[in-house]
Image (cartoon, grey):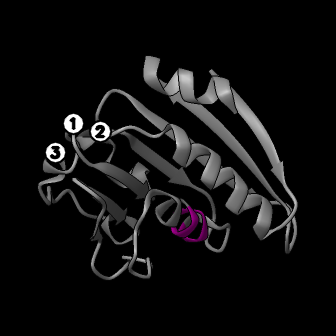
């Protein structure tokens, strides 16, 4: 199942992230794609805050993975941009579990390590403020989430 949502400003992005945050369950994996500056990290920041992350969420480009404590689990934020020419396994499967939530920017560089079910969000920059979010579910629990959007 897929859905396209047009966003007019950061407040709309925040509302979308908060809506998705209401339906996310432990074990969810969210794949983000879009050009540099499309808003992948900003979306992640809004989503993380809606889930209860207290620390500032920053781009993990140089760390590749940053983890943020939630109540009884973690939000893992990956930025795989620097892995474009790498086939190194950084233990990704440890982050795809039934307890934590994982958000991956530039997931296309680690496709062989991804789970079979996920929520994929492509963010397309239309202009300075407007974005087109294309949300695709892969798996039953993700279809339910897309169905409520």
Residue positioned 58% across, 65% down in the render: 46
Residue positioned 63% across, 64% down in the render: 35
- How far is the residue under mark 2 from the one under mark 3? 12 Å
Which is nearer the N-term, disc 1 or disc 3? 3
Q: Residue 132: where, in percent of width, then height? A: 78, 51
**Crowd tier of the residue under label 2, counting other residues whose Cα lies within 10 Å: few below 14, some 14–19, many 20 or above:** some
In this picture, is 87 found above or below 3? Answer: below
Helix, strand or loop at mark 3: helix
Say if the magenta span includes residue 45.
yes
Rendering quarter of residue 81: bottom left
Which is nearer the N-term, disc 1 or disc 2? 2
User: Start and end of the magenta stretch?
Assistant: 41-46
Instruction: Give the residue pinned by disc 1.
Output: 98
Instruction: Give the residue pinned by disc 3.
Output: 93
Residue 38 seen in the figure: yes
- How far is the residue under mark 1 from the one under mark 3? 11 Å
Instruction: Give the residue pinned by disc 2.
Output: 27
The answer to whether residue 145 is left or right of residue 100 is right
Q: Residue 143: where, in percent of width, then height? A: 54, 21
Comparing 66 with 108, the one in front is 66
Name the image quarter holding the N terminus.
Answer: top right
Determine whether label 1 and label 2 are within 8 Å by CB: yes
Comparing 42 with 83, the one in front is 42
Say if the magenta span includes residue 4.
no
Q: Nearer the viewer, mark 1 or mark 3?
A: 1
């Amino acid at each position: 199942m897929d859905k396209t949502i047009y966003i007019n400003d950061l407040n709309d992005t925040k509302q979308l992230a908060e809506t998705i945050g209401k339906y996310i369950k432990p074990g969810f994996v969210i794949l983000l794609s879009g050009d540099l500056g499309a808003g992948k990290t900003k979306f992640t920041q809004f989503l993380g805050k809606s889930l209860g992350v207290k620390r500032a969420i920053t781009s993990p480009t140089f760390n590749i993975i940053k983890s943020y404590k939630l109540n009884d689990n973690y939000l893992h934020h990956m930025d795989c941009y620097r892995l474009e020419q790498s086939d190194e396994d950084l233990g990704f499967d440890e982050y795809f579990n039934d307890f934590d939530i994982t958000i991956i920017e530039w997931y296309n560089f680690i496709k062989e390590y991804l789970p079979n079910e996920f929520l994929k969000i492509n963010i397309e920059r239309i202009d300075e403020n407007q974005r087109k979010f294309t949300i695709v579910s892969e798996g039953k629990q993700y279809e339910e989430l897309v169905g409520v959007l």
